[in-house]
Image (spheres, grey):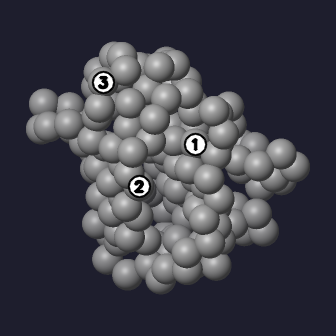
Amino acid sequence: DGFAQIHLPSTERPSGAQITVILSAYSPNGLIYFRGNQENGDFVCLELREGHVVFRINLGDDSYALVKSKKSSYADGRSHTVRVIRNYDKIHLQVDDESDRNSATIPGENAKLNINGDDHFVGGIPPGFNTTAFRNFDIHWNEFFGCIQSVRPSQ
């Protein structure tokens, strides 16, 4: 129960980035990782939704995409490795192994994720965090219930 807020500046490579998370979940819903800009609305978000792992990315305007795991059984208390890779306009989500891998294409003209100065949030967000810029994206802000063993972003 709780969250971590980390100020770790990073610069996005033009070709994209990746994030790897190792977690054990006990609830089918919860925010795993979020990083977003409250002014322009750009963000990346990793969450559990009804047992599925869901990744969302918004690059502004109509450049938004969502990809979710095939399986919905990740709130089982076991350790799972989640890997998200962005390569230009393609995003790939893999949980554990190749048997649960999905991909999506980010539509639109925007190619840059403008969140370089924004904090990383793991397991939830602080009270009072302004989510107005992200309200149209159906993000569940409830805290993650379980153990997040490792988060390795390279955005």
In the rendering, which numbered label is found on residue 78? 3
Which residue occupies 51% across, 19% down? 27
What residue would you read off at disc 1?
123
Q: Does the residue at mark 3 contact the one at mark 2 (Cβ under 8 Å)?
A: no
Report crowding for label 1: few under 14, some 14 to 19, many 20 or more residues within 10 A (C-alpha).
many
Q: Nearer the viewer, residue 72 or 106?
A: 72
Is residue 130 shown to the viewer in this render?
Answer: yes
> Where, quadrant-wise, is the N terminus in this rendering?
top right
Element under disc 3? loop
Q: Earlier in the sequence, mark 3 or mark 2?
A: 3
Q: Is residue 2 left or right of residue 10?
A: right
Report crowding for label 2: few under 14, some 14 to 19, many 20 or more residues within 10 A (C-alpha).
some
Give the percent coordinates (x, y) of residue 109: 49, 70
State how far apart marks 1 and 3 are (Cα). 17 Å
What residue would you read off at disc 2?
151
Residue 74's image quarter?
top left
